[in-house]
Amino acid sequence: MSLKKELGLAVVANWTGTVCSYLLAFIATPIIVHSFGNERYGIWSIAMSLTGYYGILDIGIRTTIIKYFADYSGQKEYKKANILLNTTLASYSFIIPIIAVVVILLVLNIEKVFNIDPVFLKETQVVFCIVGLNFCVGAIGNTFRGVIVSQRKFVLRNTVNVIFSILRSLTIIFILKMGHGLVVAALSVLAVELVSALTLICVVFKICPFLKFSRSLIDFESMKGAYVFAFFNFLRQMSIRILERTDILLVGIFLDMKTVAFYSIAESLLRYLAKIPKGVRATILPFTSKLKTENKEKGLKAIAMIMPKYTMSFLLGTALMAVLFGRQFIAFWMGPNYDLSWEILIILLFAKTFSMSQSMLIHVVVGLGHNRFYGFLGLIEMFLNLGLSIVLVKTYGVYGIAFASLITVVLTSGLITPIYSLKKIALKTSDYFLKVMVGPIALFVLLYAVNGLYLKVENILWIPVIGLEFVLFSFLFVWKELRFRNGKLKLVL
């Protein structure tokens, strides 16, 4: 199969999984929110956010697995692939005790950290303990999920993900309809995660029959190179987790649980939206490793130019729809009195546009083995975002936290990331900014000025018209690589 067809199949597979996630979230979220109530849903949102924080302690293992397992299996160095997997699993014997200590400290001091009604205190403590166990099981599953991605089996991975996402949501809804609360819901998520991890292990041993478990294959010394890579990836992943998860925690610390619920609704919409470009991004690392092995420099440069542009174009098109019609959508989806969620969504959506589009470029460079700079840049992002959030929340409340994320991302992802990354792949900075960023941003401004400011469009019946405008102008001025040839839409590089 050609590279274009394989990449296209991978993207379609990931998008199919994303569509299923969208439908699931659209149906399940209102049921879960109204069943829990705003206060309990705020606690649930913080507990789920903590899962992301615990994920920091996987020290970049999943990305390391994807890159190095792809390299070793592609070169048929099966012993190294076995050493990598077994050593990675052994490393969790150091990580899990750290998780246990963190959970215990948090549970013992929970009332000092979050503004939680004493009525919910005991329930929250138990849920946080279960969430810690959930991470430990999920981390093992993610290791094997990384192996599947390294083999470019995206259809298989997404099939497993969709099945267990549906099972997880249906289980939670069933538990809530039966009248149970947070603790039983958390236990059900843990049970589904355990079954998911076991399934992934079986799948990996099916597609990689050369793998085996053995203590003799644990060799930390020979994996030094991989773990140096993992360390700097850990720094980067830590900043991403904090940028994505800290907002909700800060709202819980400085404001209240009801505001957490409003913020979480916006954040959950954004998280599911981001799965579409993430579905594309997930294909970059293994394919970049393949192109590097085959010395196809032109292909690498094409991916570095095309992926960020189309991601930014898609997210700005979505932002246009959100600005014009987002208020009505959230009211239809969640009910009245959720305008605050819409306002937060708009701010965070612009931040996600910059971070997600430039993460495509980062993955190309990381696939070439250059990730140290992004580790240090991640630390800068982390402290800048935290500092701005703490300062701005005192004056601007929940809006200050959202704007802190936007300011941080524009400075780091919008400026510093592309300037450094383009040097590594020998592309001109001026060409990149002109071809990748200017076109999508200019089109967004033009369409918003016409439809939002001049025509003052608000009726949702205008959505198809504005969508057609966006696609038409994008084909003319932005998506220049997409052309119709012999009646088919093709990517012309």
Image (cartoon, helix red, strand yellow):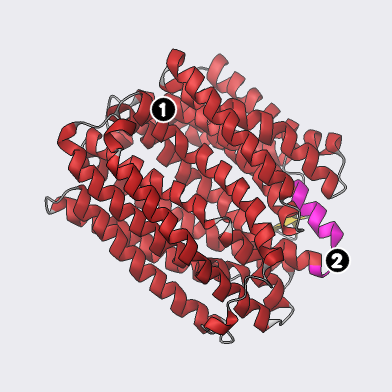
Indicate whether residue 154 is drawn in magenta.
no
Tell me the residue that label 1 is attached to. 342
Residue 263: x %, y % from top left = 38, 31
Q: Nearer the viewer, residue 412 or 152?
A: 412
Of residues 327 and 426, the one nearer the viewer is 426
Amino acid type of the residue that numbered disc 1 sits on in the rendered structure:
Trp
| 229 on left or right of 143 | right
SS of the residue at dot 2?
loop
Which residue position is annotated with label 2?
295
Query: Is residue 370 shown left or right of residue 105?
Result: right
Classify 12 as above or below 334. below
Seen at 68% across and 52% down, the residue is: 363
Residue 220, position as x, y percentages in the image: 62, 70
Q: In this view, does 404 lie above or below 425?
A: above
Q: Please identify the quadrant where the C terminus is shown.
A: bottom right
Q: Going from the N terminus, do you reach mark 1 or mark 2 first? A: 2
